[in-house]
Amino acid sequence: MSYWLGVGLVVSAFAAAGVAAGWAQRRLGLVSVAHGLVMGSSAYVFAILAAKGWQPGLAMIAGILFGVVGAVGLALASAKVVAEDYALLSFAGQMAWIGLVVSARPITGGVLGIAGVPVPPFSSAIGVAEASLVWATTMLAGLVFFLAFEKVSGLSLGAVVVARSGELASTLGLPTTAIRATVGSAYGIALGGSGVLLASYLSFLGPDSFGIDISVGVLAAAFMAVWRLWAGAVASAVLFGLPETLRLLDISYATSGFVRQVVGGLALMVTAWALTRHRRS
């Protein structure tokens, strides 16, 4: 039973990440490959502070806030770097982050990672898997509520104008920097929270925990979410829930990860093709 609760946690956490990434991609009109950077940065700050004696709850909040700072930086960079250049910039950031994690061994543990990452709050009362799943579903529900509110607010329209033309947005008097920062903050909270919960549930954190394969998987779900937000959640369930389910069939972790990369690549190809046809029509 606890294994399936763990699968539910993985699906819920990555569904929140995929939907938030797709929403940010839709609002700012840019493709990022640095999703693993945001998730991993939050997870590492959480694990490092907890190891230094911080209360797990406070360390989780600090980790998420650190992820928000990185996400806002990525969002603000979209004012100067656009299209393919932005994708390359985010990819470079992701690769540089992996190199930093491996190199900063005294802080991050290097290739050996950090073991014994604290469990989430209330785990002692209801269990680690149960508490992790409750936190992940709560975060996903909060994201859904925020997106529903955002639709009826001025943020959605303002973000669309900012994404299409910063000069037009400035002419109309829109707070372009604030809009980008708001989009980045919401995106950072969702991905940072997902990274913290996943690291807490697995109780281990290493350079491969949020590597380029995770970024590609979230990117594939984000492409689906650009089309329909619920499609991003479904894509996350397939991309990240399927490999975990395959492990019940005695399939190795490496093989299940390979399956995720293949499915994610196919999802990217199909979604890009569908979006191209839609735009042309």
Image (spheres, rainbow, N blue to C red):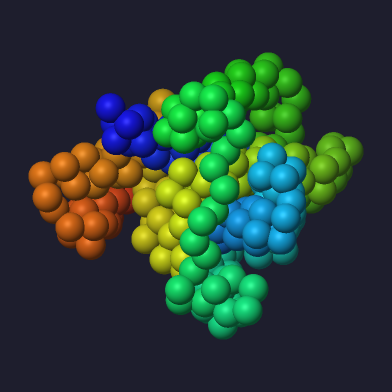
Q: Position of residue 81 (x, y in %)?
A: 66, 64
Q: Position of residue 221 (x, y in %)?
A: 39, 42
Relative to 231, is 245 on the left or the right? left
Which residue corresponds to the image point at 58% horizontal and 54% vertical from the top-left? Answer: 43
Relative to 185, is 256 on the left or the right? left
Q: Position of residue 253 (x, y in %)?
A: 23, 57
Relative to 193, is 181 on the left or the right? right
Q: Quadrant of residue 258?
A: bottom left
Q: Quadrant of residue 104?
A: bottom right
Looking at this view, is 196 or 38 the one in front?
196
- Where the N terminus falls, by quadrant? top left
Which residue corresponds to the image point at 17% horizontal and 57% vertical from the top-left? Answer: 252
Query: Is residue 258 visible to the viewer in this orientation of the structure?
Result: no
Looking at this view, is 32 or 116 the one in front?
116
Relative to 146, is 224 on the left or the right? left
Which residue corresponds to the image point at 26% horizontal and 44% vertical from the top-left? Answer: 244
Looking at this view, is 266 or 273 the one in front?
266
Query: Is residue 175 visible to the viewer in this orientation of the structure?
Result: yes
